[in-house]
Amino acid sequence: MMKKIRVGVIFGGMSSEKEVSLNSGRNVYDNLDQEFYEGVPIFMDMEGRLWIIPWQLVSQNTTIDIAEHLEAEARRISYEALKKEVDFAFISLHGKYGDDGCIQGLLELLKIPYTGPGVLASALGMDKHIQQKVLQAAGIGVPKSVIIRERQWQKNREAVKQALLDKFPFPFFTKPIREGSSVGVTLIKDEKALEKGVAEALRWDNAVLVEEFLDGKEFSSIVLEENGRITPLEVTEIYPESEFYTYDDKYMPGRCRKFTPPKTFSPDAIEKIKSEVMRAFRALGFRSYGRIDGFYMKDGRVLITDPNSSSGMAPSSFFFEQAACAGMLPSMIISKLIENARKIHAEKQGPL
């Protein structure tokens, strides 16, 4: 009999997106093809400690619920022991310490292959400011933006405010530079809101990205790498209920309308979007897979707003909607990610 590959599904974590991570990890674990893979659910707690947990804890509603049972029902493992427990890591962590190269670096040191890009590309996928610089250098369209450091804001607030108001017409956005799921994002409609928006972003990071408002149609596209070739899945067209795509719009049922394939994009627009998301994937050095978000503007421009080195994998996520359009069940696309990543890691020289 063929020995099953032990797949450690890592979820939870230390970021603002830990509940999103729980939903992703639970769904990945539940949809592993049990003919080929043995799932090992690994929970990262808020201190970064790893625990192998039983199925009944995987099914808990929140990360707090899980954390309350760890000492009695789970088995704590050291980072060094991870290699003895799993053959492959399916990273379902989101946000800081999960999407940003931290866990990827640990897995590289342990020589455990994993899903998604390597250390540098994951870090780029998390830092909104630097990723825009990289994309711009590659000739890829991005929104107009500037960065404000916390020290700069505290030292010379009025001058910074005036410079922003001179550059950006209302409305515009303030965002933490390293958060996902729209955490800490504020739509700025007047000068009073600017103070609150910067303060909210600085709750999550030491720098704020100030970005123009885009009057266009929002999209998301999953890109897969297989045998050295990259292919975008079907494009999803997004219509949030709120004024922008908020955390609640992303994760609360009924808060957003999504069309996969797109409802109003022309065939030419779809091809242009797919071409640009593949260019962004390559420019940022992504491997294995990624999710590239952006806007299709009224003048035909494609602007990339949020390249992600991983994707949410809850049952209703873009990922599974787009895979379904390609005729793949959840277990099929998860298996494809695992096998593609194993091949990529087997062929690499040095860290991914």
Image (tube, grey):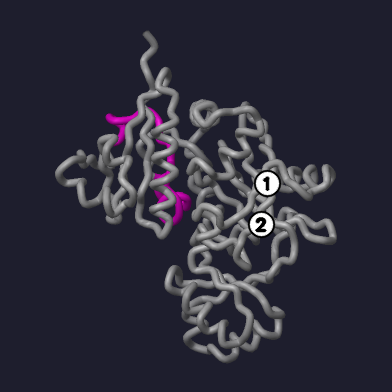
* Residue 213 x %, y %: 68, 70
Is residue 338 or residue 321 the one in the foreground? Answer: 321
Label placed on residue 231: none
* Residue 81 x %, y %: 25, 36
Residue at x 64%, y 82% (from the top left corner):
164
Is residue 35 or residue 1 the one in the foreground? Answer: 35
Which residue corresponds to mark 1?
259
Residue at x 47%, y 85% (from the top left corner):
154
Q: Is residue 283 visible?
A: no
Label placed on residue 239: 2
Q: Are marks 2 and 1 in contact (CB under 8 Å)?
A: yes
Rounded to the nearest angstrom, the CA distance separating label 2 from label 1 is: 9 Å
Inspect the image, locate mark 2, and give the three-letter code of the amino acid beneath it. Tyr
Which range of residues does the magenta coloring cover? 82-105
Q: Is residue 77 left or right of residue 352?
A: left
* Quarter of the picture holding the N terminus: top left
Toward the left, the furthest residue is 72
Q: Is residue 149 left or right of residue 171?
A: left
Residue at x 41%, y 41% (from the top left corner):
25
The question of residue 88 being in magenta is answered with yes
Q: Is residue 154 left or right of residue 291?
A: left
For numbered disc 2, what is the local secondary structure?
A: strand
* Residue 8 x %, y %: 36, 34
Residue at x 70%, y 61% (from the top left corner):
142
